[in-house]
Image: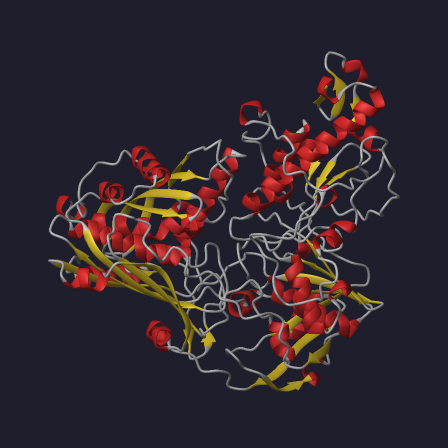
C-alpha cells in the first residue's frame, strides 16, 4: 500500500523534548545529505545514510505502524522479519506492523536490496528506532498520567501503569497525528532475547496469500487512465545498431506508430496486442554488431583479455616453493558458464511524464539507484524523477527490470502527458537482460607426506564491472553514461577459508570486458569461486586419502565454521571414509554418493555447510540430487521458518543453475531465447531438504538470502566424484558434459 501523507505541523510535548507525527515525504529528505549534488554513485549498501525515528517508522491514526525503507520484498521475507523486530520492541501485535512498498518520494534511501544485507544492516537500526520510540511513548504517557516512567509498562500497543490496565493509553492517542523529531538513540534499551515473544518465532509471511492468488498488485497488472502500450525492438545481435526503420511496414495496424530516440526503436499503440503485432511486423535493418568469442573459446578469451587490476585475497608464505617441494602436486581449472536471471514474468514498467516530472513504476530492487540512472539518461534533475516499487517476478539480481524502466521513461517523455506501459517479450528477457558472466579459475596445491596441504595457489579471471549501476539499454541507445564502472565483489570467497593451510596465495584478475553486459545474479562471484575452492579442497582430501569432513575440520579452527560442518554431517548421518567410495563399491550405470561443501560468506558473516546425496546415471549423463542436508549459522534468528525457506530456495535455484541453466550463442547472437532452449529443473528433480539452524542469540543478525547458494555447486560436484570418481570441473554439469567425462574415464 502506498499512502500519500502530508507533513503535519509539529506539536510540542511538554517535558518530553520531542515531536511526533506521521512520517511523510520528509523521510527521503532525511536520507539525502543536504547540499549534495545529484551524482551517479550507488548508495553505500553496507552503510546507508542515517535517518531519525521518523525516517524509519510512522504511526497511523488507526494504530498501525509502517516500516519505511527502500528495501524491496520479492520473496526473501523482509516484511515479516522487519515487522517482528518492530512488534517486539513496541509490544505490538505483529499484524499491526506493515512495510509499504518503496517509493523514492517517501522512503529513506537504504540502497539496493542485495547482498543478504537488508536484515543485517537495517534490522539493528529498526530495532533501535522502535526502542527509541517506545521510550518516547513512555515519557509522553508519564506526562499525561502523572505516573513515573519506571511505573509504566507497554502492552499490546498501549502504555499503562503497572497493575492498572483500565488507565491504558493507546499509542495513537498519545501521538495524536504528530511526528517524532528525534534521532535514534544508540543506547535505547532493547528487549533481551529471553523476553522475546514475537521475534524468534516462525510467523507466516503476510504477502504470500496475495501472491499465490494473483492479487499482489504486480507491476504487470498496473493500469493507469489513458495508458498506451509499447514494445521495444532490441538488436538481434550483440552490439548491433539500427540502420533503417520502415515505419510504413506497420501502417495497417490500428493506432500503432514508431518511436525512435537515438538507437532506441519502439512501437506504441492504444491496445497491447497492436503493440505486440507492430513489434513483430516492423521492418528494421540492423548492422552486424560486435564480434564476441565463440562458446568454446570464451574461457581462454577471458584469461587473455586485458586486465584492469589484480586483487590479492591472501598472500601467506611461499606457496610456489611449498608446492614445488611437495611429494604430490595437484592442478585443476574450474569453469562456470554464462547464465541469465530467467525471470518468469518478463520485465515491465509504467511511466508518466507531466509538468516536467517523471513518475516511474518498476519492480527494481534499487529504486533510488534507478532514479539516479534515469535522471542522468533523460537529463532531468534527480528530484524530478519518482520511482515507485511494485512486486515483480523474482530474480535476485540486476536483470532487465531497470532496462525496461529506463526505456519506458524515454518513451513516456515522447508520448507525454499520456502514461505508457512497456513489457518485454520472452526473447527480450532471455536475450537482452545482463548476464552472469563466464568465470574461470585455476588452482594448484602441494600435498605433504602426512596429507597436509603444504601450499595452495589460485587465480581467477572475473569481470571488472559488475556494480549495482549496470548501464541500461536506454542509456546505451541514447549514447549516455548513467553509472560508474564499478569493480563489484566477484573476488569474494576465492581464498580458501582454512587456516590450516600453511602457505597460500589467491589472486583475482579483473577482466576489462566480457562478451555480454556483466551483472550480478544471486550470490555473484561467491558461488563460482566457492565451486572451485571447495571442489579443489575435496581433491586435496582425496589425494591425501582422508575423509572430506574430517579433512575440513582438521584445517579449520573457526568454532562457528566447525559447528555448521559438524551439524550438516550429523543431519546426513555422514559415514567417515575417503572419496571416492561409490566407484569401488558400486557397478552399473546408476551410482550413488555424497559430498560436502562449506563457506563463511565473504569470510566475515553467515556460515553454511551442505551435504548433498546424488544418483548419477552414467549412460544418460543425468545427475539427480536426492537429498540435501544444510546447516546454517545466521547469528541471531528473527524468523526460523524464513531462514528455512531461503535455504530451500537457494538449494533448488542453484541446483538448476548447476545442472541445467546456460546461455548459448552462435556468432554474436544469443540462441537460448525461450524456456525450451534455456531450461530449468523440474519439480520431480527437487531433492528432500533438511535445514538445521544454528541459532546464536547473543550474536548480530546476518542474512540468509544468498549464502546458501554458494555451497551447492561444490557439494554436488563432490558428491558426483564420490559416486563415480569423475571430477566435474565445469558448470552447468549437463548430460553432455557428464557423458563426455564418463567416456574419457571409460566408465561407459
Q: What percent of the width, then of the height, locates residue 85?
A: 61, 35
**Res 207 visible:** no
Task: Locate residue 417 relative to residue 494 in the image: left or right.
Answer: right
- The quarter of the image holding the N terminus is top right
- The quarter of the image holding the C terminus is bottom left
Residue closest to the eye, 381 or 101: 381
Task: Locate residue 3 relative to residue 221 in the image: left or right.
Answer: right
Q: What percent of the width, then of the height, locates residue 505?
A: 29, 61
Residue closest to the eye, 130 or 471: 130
Residue closest to the eye, 94 or 747: 94
| Label tally | 0
Residue closest to the eye, 408 or 518: 518
Q: Residue at x 67, y 82 (%)?
A: 262
Q: Quadrant of residue 737?
A: bottom left
Q: What percent of the width, then of the height, locates residue 345?
A: 58, 57
What kind of colouring is applied to the model shown?
A: secondary structure
From this view, report whether residue 524 is shown above or below residue 643.
below
Q: Quadrant of residue 375?
A: bottom right
**Res 711 visible:** yes
Q: What percent of the width, then of the height, locates residue 341?
A: 50, 60
Task: Locate residue 643 relative to residue 86 in the image: left or right.
Answer: left
From this view, report whether residue 62 is shown above or below residue 731.
above
From this view, report whether residue 585 is shown above or below residue 392.
above
Amino acid at each position: 500500500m502506498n499512502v500519500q501523507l502530508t507533513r503535519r505541523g509539529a506539536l510540542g510535548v511538554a517535558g518530553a523534548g520531542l515531536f511526533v507525527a506521521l512520517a511523510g515525504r520528509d523521510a527521503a529528505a532525511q536520507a539525502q545529505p543536504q547540499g549534495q549534488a545529484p551524482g551517479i554513485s550507488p548508495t553505500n549498501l553496507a552503510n546507508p545514510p542515517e535517518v531519525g525515528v521518523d525516517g524509519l517508522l510512522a504511526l497511523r491514526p488507526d494504530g498501525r505502524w509502517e516500516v519505511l525503507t527502500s528495501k524491496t520484498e520479492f520473496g526473501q521475507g523482509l516484511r515479516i522479519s522487519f515487522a517482528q523486530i518492530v512488534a517486539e520492541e513496541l509490544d505490538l501485535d505483529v499484524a499491526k506492523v506493515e512495510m509499504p512498498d518503496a517509493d523514492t518520494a517517501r522512503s529513506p534511501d537504504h540502497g539496493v536490496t542485495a547482498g543478504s544485507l537488508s536484515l543485517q544492516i537495517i534490522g539493528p537500526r529498526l530495532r533501535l528506532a522502535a526502542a527509541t520510540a517506545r521510550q518516547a511513548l513512555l515519557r509522553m504517557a508519564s506526562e499525561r498520567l502523572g505516573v513515573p516512567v519506571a511505573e509504566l509498562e507497554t502492552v499490546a500497543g498501549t502504555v499503562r501503569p503497572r497493575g492498572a490496565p483500565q488507565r491504558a493509553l493507546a499509542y495513537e492517542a498519545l501521538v495524536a497525528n504528530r511526528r517524532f523529531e528525534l534521532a535514534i538513540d544508540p543506547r535505547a534499551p532493547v528487549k533481551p532475547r529471553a523476553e522475546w515473544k514475537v521475534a524468534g518465532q516462525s510467523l507466516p509471511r503476510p504477502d504470500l496469500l496475495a501472491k499465490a492468488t494473483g492479487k499482489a498488485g504486480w507491476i504487470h497488472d498496473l493500469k493507469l487512465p489513458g495508458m498506451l502500450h509499447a514494445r521495444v525492438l532490441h538488436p538481434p545481435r550483440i552490439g548491433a545498431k539500427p540502420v533503417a526503420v520502415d515505419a510504413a511496414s506497420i501502417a495497417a495496424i490500428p493506432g500503432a506508430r514508431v518511436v525512435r530516440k537515438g538507437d532506441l526503436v519502439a512501437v506504441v499503440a492504444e491496445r497491447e496486442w497492436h503493440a505486440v503485432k507492430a513489434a513483430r511486423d516492423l521492418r528494421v535493418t540492423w548492422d552486424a554488431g560486435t564480434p564476441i568469442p565463440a562458446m568454446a573459446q570464451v574461457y581462454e578469451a577471458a584469461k587473455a583479455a586485458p586486465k584492469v587490476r589484480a586483487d590479492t585475497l591472501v598472500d601467506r608464505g611461499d606457496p610456489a616453493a611449498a608446492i614445488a617441494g611437495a611429494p604430490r602436486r595437484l592442478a585443476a581449472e574450474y569453469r562456470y558458464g554464462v547464465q541469465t536471471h530467467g525471470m518468469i514474468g518478463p520485465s515491465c514498467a509504467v511511466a508518466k511524464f507531466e509538468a516536467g516530472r517523471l513518475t516511474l513504476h518498476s519492480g527494481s530492487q534499487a529504486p533510488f539507484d534507478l532514479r539516479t540512472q534515469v535522471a542522468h539518461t533523460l537529463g532531468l534533475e534527480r528530484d524530478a524523477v519518482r520511482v515507485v516499487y511494485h512486486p515483480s517476478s523474482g530474480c535476485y539480481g540486476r536483470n532487465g527490470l531497470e532496462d525496461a524502466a529506463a526505456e519506458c521513461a524515454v518513451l513516456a517523455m515522447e508520448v507525454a502527458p499520456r502514461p505508457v506501459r512497456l513489457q518485454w517479450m520472452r526473447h527480450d528477457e532471455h536475450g537482452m537482460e545482463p548476464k552472469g558472466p563466464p568465470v574461470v579459475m585455476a588452482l594448484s596445491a602441494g600435498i605433504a607426506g602426512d596429507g597436509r596441504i603444504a601450499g595452495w595457489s589460485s587465480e581467477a579471471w572475473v569481470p571488472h564491472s559488475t556494480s549495482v549501476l549496470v548501464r541500461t539499454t536506454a542509456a546505451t541507445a541514447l549514447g549516455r553514461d548513467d553509472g560508474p564502472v564499478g569493480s563489484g565483489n566477484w573476488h569474494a570467497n576465492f581464498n580458501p577459508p582454512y587456516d590450516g593451510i600453511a602457505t597460500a596465495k589467491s589472486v583475482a584478475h579483473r577482466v576489462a570486458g566480457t562478451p555480454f553486459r556483466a551483472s550480478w545474479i544471486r550470490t555473484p562471484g561467491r558461488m563460482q569461486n566457492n565451486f572451485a575452492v571447495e571442489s579443489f579442497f575435496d581433491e586435496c582430501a582425496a589425494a591425501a586419502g582422508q575423509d572430506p569432513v574430517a579433512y575440513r575440520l582438521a584445517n579449520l579452527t573457526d568454532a562457528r565454521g566447525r559447528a555448521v560442518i559438524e551439524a550438516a554431517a550429523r543431519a546426513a548421518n555422514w559415514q567417515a571414509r575417503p572419496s571416492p567410495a561409490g566407484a569401488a563399491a558400486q557397478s552399473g550405470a546408476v551410482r550413488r554418493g555424497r559430498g560436502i561443501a562449506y563457506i563463511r560468506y565473504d569470510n566475515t558473516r553467515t556460515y553454511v555447510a551442505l551435504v548433498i546425496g546424488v544418483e548419477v546415471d552414467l549412460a544418460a549423463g543425468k545427475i539427480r540430487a536426492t537429498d540435501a542436508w544444510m546447516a546454517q549459522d545466521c547469528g541471531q534468528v528473527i524468523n526460523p521458518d524464513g531462514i528455512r525457506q531461503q535455504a530451500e530456495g537457494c538449494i533448488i535455484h542453484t541446483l538448476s543453475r548447476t545442472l541445467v541453466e546456460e546461455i548459448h550463442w552462435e556468432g554474436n547472437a544469443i540462441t537460448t531465447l525461450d524456456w525450451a532452449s534455456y531450461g530449468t529443473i523440474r519439480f520431480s528433480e527437487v531433492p528432500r531438504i533438511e535445514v538445521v539452524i544454528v541459532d546464536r542469540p547473543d550474536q548480530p543478525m546476518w542474512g540468509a538470502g544468498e549464502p546458501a547458494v554458494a555451497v551447492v555447486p561444490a557439494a554436488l560436484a563432490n558428491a558426483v566424484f564420490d559416486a563415480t570418481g569423475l571430477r566435474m570441473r565445469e558448470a552447468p554439469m549437463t548430460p553432455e558434459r557428464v557423458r563426455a567425462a564418463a567416456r574419457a574415464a571409460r566408465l561407459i
